[in-house]
Image (spheres, rainbow, N blue to C red):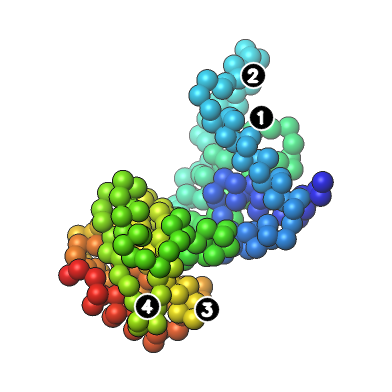
Amino acid sequence: MTSPCAEWNLLLHGYADGELDAANALKFEQHLGSCGGCAAELQRVMALKQAIAQDQVSWPASPALKERVAAALRRETSMRSALPAVAGTSLLSRLFDHVRRWSLVPSMAILAAGVFLMLARPETGMSLQDELVASHVRSLLANHLTDVETSDQHTVKPWFTGKIDFSPPVVDLASRGFPLVGGRVDYVGGRVVAALIYRRNGHVINVFIWPSLTASNATMEREGYNLVNWKQAELSIWLVSDLNPVELKEFKEDFAEAAPK
């Protein structure tokens, strides 16, 4: 069996923990496609995480370990009281907390890796637009573009019944040059959403839909992908594609015209 690449180890564990930004996640997923060793190691790590997360899996701490933890906390308290107050020390505080949580780890290499991942993580979470782009890219890389693959809108629409709490509009735009490919359930912005997939020649258009009472209308670009957003029939609709802005706008107008108002 091929061994995992040492130089990808930090990104592998950051990916397994969901701590990478969209750019690094995409970079690692591209590497996975050509490296059996890292793919096998990721599978092993995910299996271990799943086993640890099971109910009734626990490791009771020994009295000696409890005392070491208590001593570490006492040292932290005394060190904190000795530090002068400095404005804007949120990163320092988080770094201190991170080091404290790893204070019982004997390996400095593991500690350094943990600190690196914490500092490499973005200051804030991913924006909605970045999440949409990441979901679009994953659907292409992971060979999971559709859960139901058909160009029949009357098959795709009822497929969503029972899987999401709303009914997404599914329209046939083949005559306009945008054939329907299928649909899937995705997860964006902290909720389950519907994703419809259309094509324009060799370009994939992901249409993300979920209920929203907030009016919106936006066009933007992220990491080489074009995004279009509008609200219709109390639904927020987002388009993500590498299709050029002119044709994506044409798709938006055709979709909006054919969907319920």
Which of pointers 1 and 4 lies earlier in the amino acid sequence? 1
* Residue denoted by label 3: 202
Tell me the CA gap for discs 4 and 3.
14 Å
Instruction: Name which residue lies at 44% across and 68% down.
Output: 181
Judged from the image, the secondary structure of the residue bearing numbered disc 3 is loop
Q: Is residue 168 left or right of residue 74?
A: left
Say if mark 3 contacts mark 2, CB within 8 Å: no
Tell me the CA gap for discs 4 and 2.
66 Å
Q: Is residue 177 above or below residue 239?
A: below
Tell me the CA gap for discs 2 and 1.
9 Å
For disc 4, the neighbor class at 10 Å (few under 14, some 14 to 19, many from 20) is: few
Judged from the image, the secondary structure of the residue bearing numbered disc 2 is helix
Say if mark 2 contacts mark 1, CB within 8 Å: yes
> Residue type at mark 4?
Ala
Which of pointers 1 and 3 lies earlier in the amino acid sequence? 1
Coordinates of residue 79 in the picture (x, y in percent): 57, 34
For disc 2, the neighbor class at 10 Å (few under 14, some 14 to 19, many from 20) is: few
Which of pointers 3 and 2 lies earlier in the amino acid sequence? 2
Judged from the image, the secondary structure of the residue bearing numbered disc 1 is loop
Coordinates of residue 221 in the picture (x, y in percent): 43, 76
Q: Which numbered mark, 1 or 4, is in the foreground of this view?
A: 4
* Residue denoted by label 4: 174
* Residue denoted by label 2: 65
* Residue denoted by label 1: 104
